[in-house]
Image: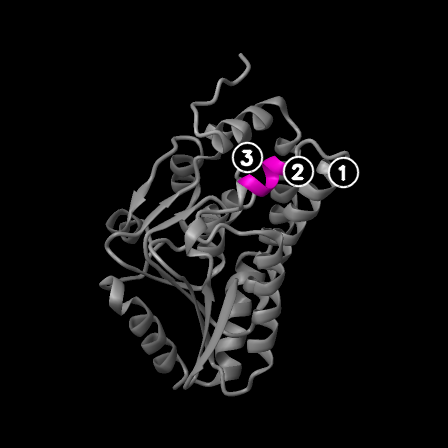
Amino acid sequence: MIDVKLTGATGTIVLQRPQRCNALTREMILQLGQALGDLHQEKRVRGIVLTGAGAHFCAGMDLKQWQEQASSSQAQQHWFADAQALQELLEQMLRLPKPIVAAVDGAAMGSGLAVVLACDLVVASPRATFSAASSRLGLVSGLVAPLAHFRCGAALASSLLIGGSELSAEQAKSQGLVHHLAEPEMIWVRASGWIESIAGGAAESLQLTKRVINEMVGEPLISQLAAGAAALASSLTTEAASEGLDAFSNKRPPRFPK
């Protein structure tokens, strides 16, 4: 479900589940963490491109997997473990010394948007969209909230999470979420070329710069992610989430409790 490629100074991680819009399973989260760790150790890799196969970047967590667990006696344990695993992946991305560039085509939704926000730089195609309307599923975007606030401010976080806005690529660029636009067939080329340019600088300087941004300027972010993961996991145990996931699974409008 994850492909890893090496091209010059660029390591590329491809989410390979296009038939499910690259929705994240717990196995994919583990594989992503392993791939990032491997590329961290690969000396010739100076930066990483993260992208998705098919028409979309990532539709978030696999809600079908969560819904199927709902009847299990260990459902809450699984949900809390999944939320923690995703939190740890995002922290790993933030702490990784090498820059990560998201190459986004199509939708980046929910946890998929969180993954984009955990990247240092973003290249997107004009057909990319960004959203996190978790309340329509009875959930809480606890991991998107602190990352969106860190990258772009509280106003954008409120628009995405409370207002349910879906940002186009142009809107995301105007808000600072996207740094460059490129045609779909050129987003990897643009992202890889950016890494090649970055590689002309001193590796130690770049590593320290990323640390200053993510760990010093963004000092509260890690504790906020832990709180956000707990909020996400807790929301999964509610009656609203049960209804939202069932409605999603059965492709019908949700009927939330009043």
The image's mark for residue 74 is 1
Which residue does the image show at 62% across and 53% down from the upper left? Answer: 26
Let me know if residue 243 appears in the view: yes
Binning the other alpha carbons within 10 Å of mark 2 as few (below 14), some (14 to 19) or many (20 upward) gives: some
- Discs 1/3, front: 1
* Residue 209 higher or lower than 113, as above or below: below
Magenta stretch: residue 67 in it?
A: yes
Tell me if 217 is positioned left or right of 54 in this view: right
Q: Residues within 10 Å of mark 1 (few under 14, many from 20)?
A: few
Q: Residue 76 appears in which quarter of the rendering?
A: top right
Earlier sequence position, callout 2 versus callout 1: 2
Q: Secondary structure at mark 1?
A: loop
Q: In the picture provided, is 222 more to the left or to the right than 255?
A: right
Amino acid identity at mark 1:
Gln
Residue 145 percent coordinates (x, y): 51, 42
Q: Are marks 2 and 1 in contact (CB under 8 Å)?
A: yes
- Residue designated by label 3: 140
For this orientation, the residue located farthest to the right is 73
When the figure is inspected, residue 8 is found, relative to residue 188, above or below; the finding is below
Residue ID at (49%, 55%): 115
Which amino acid is tagged 3? Answer: Val
For the residues labelled 2 and 3, the Cα–Cα distance comes to: 18 Å
Identified at 32% across, 52% down, the residue is: 106
Labels 2 & 3 near each other (Cβ < 8 A): no
Amino acid type at mark 2: Gln
The span picked out in magenta is 64-68
Going from N to C along the chain, the mark reached first, 2 or 3, is 2
Q: Which residue is mark 2?
A: 69
